[in-house]
Amino acid sequence: MRYIILFCWICIFPFAGYSTEVVAEKVLQKADSLFQLADYQQAGIWYDKAAYLSVDNMQKTHALMRKGDCYLMRSNYAAAEQCLSRITYYGLNDSMQYAARYKTALSAYLNSSFENAESQILQLKAFVSDTLLSVNAYPLYALILNESNRWTEAKEVLLQYISASGNSAEQKQQMKQEVESLYAGSSIPRLKDVEKAKKLSSIIPGTGQIYAGYWGEGILSVTLQALGLGITGLGIWKQYYASGVLIGFSFFQRFYMGGITRTEFLAQKKNYTLKRNFNNSRKEFVLKLLPD
Amino acid sequence: MHIKLIAAVRFIVWFALCTPAMAQQTDSTKTVSDELQFIDYLINNREFDDALVLLRQPELLTKANAEQTDSIHYLMGWTFYNMKQLDSSIVYFKKISSTSPAYIKGSYYKTFELLYSGRYAEAEVAISNLPVQDSLQQELRLFQQSTGYLLQKKYSLFDSAAAQFTYTNFACATEQKNLFTYRNELKKVKQRSPVLAGVFSAVLPGSGKLYAGYKGQAIATLMPCVVFGAVAVENYIKDGPKDAKFIAAASVFSIFYVGNIWGSVMSVKTIRTQRNNEIYNSILLDLHIPLRRIFN
């Protein structure tokens, strides 16, 4: 009898763990079925329940990643990033670590948290020892670098990705040429120096706006400031000193100071437009490279 | 030997029947207490929307016993508190019964939320009903009460309540001392006269703003009055009172002049409110810190 009881107690231990895992597995199945029905909020709750019940970190990570998917499907990128930040990477194998870090980087990118997105990619490169796996993250890395205006680095990353891809030599050559032309020195945006634009406007009114690419606004600014000075001169000439100096000069001074502020805004607007046009057109190409 | 064998067989049969039941615990996870533990986990992971979805399940309340109902109310209040929806949080904290273990935390947080929301009359009632089980809670209660008086600028009541501070507990001793600093700062906020500010600005445009405490704005107000005043005077001297240039300049000057007086009158109240709000924000921040130290 003593031995039978001992045998039974020995048997309890594997079952104790097994029971929790089985429950977590069933909860995951329920979550999957809700996800299939596009009920992403309920699916997310059940995935979180699976993560809560899981003892195994692999299963927990899988559940949290699926919850992240639910948020991504609802276009709630901030919540996806926050949810995926709960993943602990201890004891994960290469493929799971890659998948988790990639998804976190993607959510951060979509949430415009480019620093976090880059940090996740750098950690992915450092901790995923299988380089054949980690290189798959390079197209996303290129998109992140594009948003940080580091276009030369983005080009290098894309070239590395193409070299490591399983395409034929001819296809690789063609893709590399495309990258070279897309990131050619002449096509990379030459961003305006905002401080330089402001200085120009403060030395010769209107030139800052012209430097930023807004000719019309530059000419209008210089005309209005000339008009202010004209009123001042006319006032003095006609012996209306107070009217001339105070109104005319105030008019000039307002447009002079306003012109500098406006120049700063226009230079920033121009930079934003240049960056968006370049990045959006390159994004189409990079998205084609993304692994399925 | 025969009896022992039967007992052993019985045990093995029982064990064999129970083991699958242990493995299939899916249904048992649906019990209210398990669900509440899971909701607590969601809140700790800042998944507030999901927590609310679960807490709002009608079957959760119908299945819950009295103690669990209190837990549901506490978790609702706590979720709304974390979501900074204080009015909703107060509603649920109020529903927790006095027998619940969550009652004390809920009551102190509810008082904090009432004070934070400026619902001082309700806060005073809540403070008078606060549970006090030990010296720490006594200190915390006194601290919340004093803060309430200070926020309402009831200085004599504040003084009598704050005189009872013992400063024996690190959780709120610093914040208790800080209250006296805020009291002095609130008293120092100068009670300027709006009428006097208006009179000053009528005599010298911009001086009312200077009196109120806005130094930069004083010059900005003075400049257009000087410019248009000078232009109006020049045109009056050169072309007389019927000239269009004079009428235009005098009209613009009048607008700036009247605006300068009105602005000075208003600025007295604005700067006082602004300064008071700065001090109130510091008081409310300090009101929060002991709660986090004691209950988290």
Image (cartoon, coloured by chain):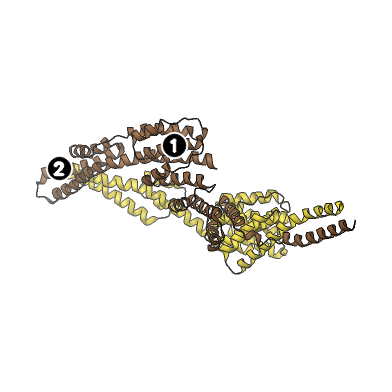
Tell me if residue A41 comes above or below residue A148 in the rendering: below
**Label 2 sits on what residue type?**
Glu
For discs 2 and 1, the disc positioned in front in the rendered view: 1
Q: Is residue A177 above or below residue A85?
A: below
Name the residue: 50% across, 44% down: B104
Residue B143, disc: 1
Q: Which kind of residue does numbered mark 1 sit on? A: Phe
**Could you say which chain is coloured brown in the image?**
B
Q: Is residue A209 above or below residue A281?
A: above
Helix, strand or loop at mark 2: helix
Q: Position of residue B32 (x, y in %)?
A: 59, 58
Q: Are marks 2 and 1 in contact (CB under 8 Å)?
A: no
Quadrant of the frame with the N terminus of chain B = bottom right
Q: Earlier in the sequence, mark 2 or mark 1?
A: 1
Determine which of the numbered discs, if any, sits on residue A286 in the image: none
Chain A takes which shade in the image?
yellow
Q: Chain of mark 1?
A: B
State left or right for residue B72 relative to residue A212. Answer: right
Q: Which residue is mark 2?
A: B234
Q: Label 2 to label 1, Cα distance in Å? A: 65 Å
Instruction: Quarter of the image for the C terminus of chain B: give it.
Output: top right
Tell me where residue B190 sits by quadrant: top left
Answer with left or right where residue B164 lies relative to residue A146: left
Task: Please say whether residue A284 is visible from this viewpoint.
Answer: no
Outermost residue, front direction?
B3
Q: Nearer the viewer, residue B241 or B212?
A: B212
The relative height of residue B141 versus residue A87 in the rendered view (above or below) is: above
Callout 2: few (<14), some (14-19), or many (20+) C-alpha neighbours within 10 Å? many
Question: Does dot 1 land on a helix, a strand or a loop?
Answer: helix
Tell me where residue A249 appears, x and y as whole percent. 26, 44
Crowdedness of circle 1 by 10 Å Cα count: few (<14), some, many (20+)? many
Is residue B198 visible to the viewer in this orientation of the structure?
A: yes
